[in-house]
Amino acid sequence: MADKLIIFDTTLRDGEQSPGASMTRDEKLRIARQLERLKVDVIEAGFAASSNGDFEAVQSIANAIKESVVCSLSRANDRDISQAALALKGAERARIHTFIATSALHMEKKLRMTPEQVLEQAKLSVRFARNLVADIEFSAEDAYRSDVDFLCRVIEGVIAEGATTINVPDTVGYAVPELYGHFIKTLRERVPNSDKAIWSVHCHNDLGMAVANSLAGVMIGGARQVECTINGLGERAGNCSLEEIVMAVKTRKDYYGLELGIDAKHIVATSRMVSQTTGFVVQPNKAVVGANAFAHASGIHQDGVLKARDTYEIMRAEDVGWSANKIVLGKLSGRNAFKQRLQDLGVQLESETDINSAFSKFKELADRKSEIFDEDILALVSDESVSQGQEQFSFVSLSQRSETGEKPHASIVFKFNGKEVKSESEGNGPVDASLKAIESYVKSGAEMVLYSVNAISGSTESQGEVTVRLQNSGRVVNGVGSDPDIVVASSKAYLSALNKLQSKSDRVAAQG
Ligand code: KIV
Ligand code: ZN
């Protein structure tokens, strides 16, 4: 394909490094399948050597994904690289992504290695990896703050050892577009064997310029791979956002002139899935995937759009998967209509049993809520996927009382290891009373670091989607629950977070 831009998605690795965004193996697998549907070229599935959980996640993604390249991150040492290769064994197309820091600051203060040691380690690691897998990406961590002469030597060395992609990260989001673009250009001009590898950009968003920097790396620098995440998820202020980079390149093809493999109509469903799984709510005015991205509030704009859409619209909402918030299903809709809608939304449930279970939840919801929107269906199947595992806790029923001047009281029934238990408590409000009732039985001792409620389809009739972030013994997990009753949604979210706290795993950070 003429001048293709490779989309490398790192939602499941760099995105997951965002505090509180950790995902279970099954959640990662589900997102990986969605990324394949979106037709991303490379899925960075995790960092196999960082924890048993991540190893298993990379392994199951490698076994399941057929179209996209599946990649694992690894530090530049033989043990990490071997773990990555082992986890990727079942992959149709595997990539090992090995990295080492090259800035003076990182080498001296973090690695405590001399530049010559780093150069040697980088070359040895790529040589070692190349004997296990043909597709090798090398990243010079903190490349943008590295000495150019030294960086050129490292890159020349690793290409000579067989690296096929060279990634130049702006690890701390310090770059500005023109300078970053010229930085990549200089490297490509000065490294004698630069034409033997594909060049890649990886920008963090600390100054809000990750997308602009990445595009400059492509246009000025000649990079042909962009590393990005859904919703811009990632460490600190996040990474370059996939939906923004993709729609910029597509919408301004007149300028960029690049081909993309992405099937953009799955963007909104993917964004929604990542936000529901991680509990990182998408801001309403976020480009492409924010709730207001295609809303026209002012009379003049509405009038213009009604007369000719392109007066105020540069992209079509349906091209990225928005269905204009239409009522799609109701009480009388049958199983086939439900299944078809799931397909249209790009949701693939694993088995007929899962579809049946989701359908019966849909019927329950339709009994309580006359209009079912796409957002409701996505929330419902997201709950469904979360509840597929062997859960320790699950919601059964709730009754609560609150009245002005009275202390709210809640009585909750939930399953604990398959057995129904009942617990009661008072609280400052009905939500507080319900969560205290759960906690007084479970005694997890976890600290709540975030509680947020979001109306799924924007009206008081809509389902509430609640995110609860809990922290315990250094672990941070998110639980998400949805229900038309926000007290029930809160209880479900709390129980879901408790389930995640049970699966303990220690992890090594990529930028630790
Ligand atoms: O930001 C960064 O430098 C990284 C590398 C590990 C590729 O994420
Ligand atoms: Zn990064």
Image (cartoon, rainbow, N blue to C red):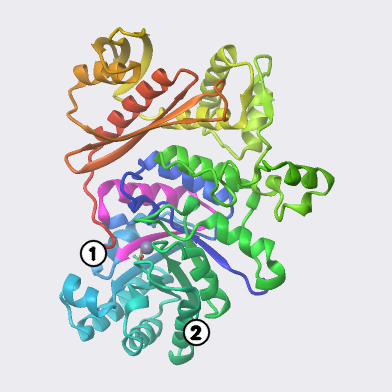
Q: Residue sitting at 58 percent across and 41 percent down? A: 291
Relative side of 194 to 415, left or right: right
- Which residue is the site of mark 2? 185
Q: Residue furthest right?
A: 307
In the displayed structure, would residue 161 be above or below residue 139? Answer: below
Q: For this rendering, which residue is in front, 314 or 42?
A: 314
Q: Position of residue 99 (x, y in %)?
A: 32, 70
- Which residue is the site of mark 1? 79
Number of the front mark, 1 or 2: 2
Q: Is residue 71 magenta?
A: yes
Q: Residues within 10 Å of mark 1 (few under 14, many from 20)?
A: few
Badge 1 or badge 2: first in the primary sequence: 1
Q: Give the spatial CA distance, label 1 vs label 2.
A: 34 Å
Specify the amino acid type for callout 1: Arg
Q: Position of residue 13 (x, y in %)?
A: 38, 55
- Name the quarter showing ligand 1: bottom left
Q: Residue sitting at 50 percent across and 78 percent down? A: 178
Q: For this rendering, which residue is in front, 505 or 56?
A: 505
Magenta segment boundaries in residue numbering: 50-74
Q: Residue sitting at 38 percent across and 83 percent down? A: 155
Relative side of 469 to 267, left or right: left
In the displayed structure, would residue 353 be above or below residue 238? Answer: above
- Residue 322 makes an appearance in the image: yes
Q: Position of residue 463 (x, y in %)?
A: 52, 24
Give yes or no for contact between labels 1 and 2 (Cβ–Cβ under 8 Å). no
Q: Residues within 10 Å of mark 2 (few under 14, many from 20)?
A: some
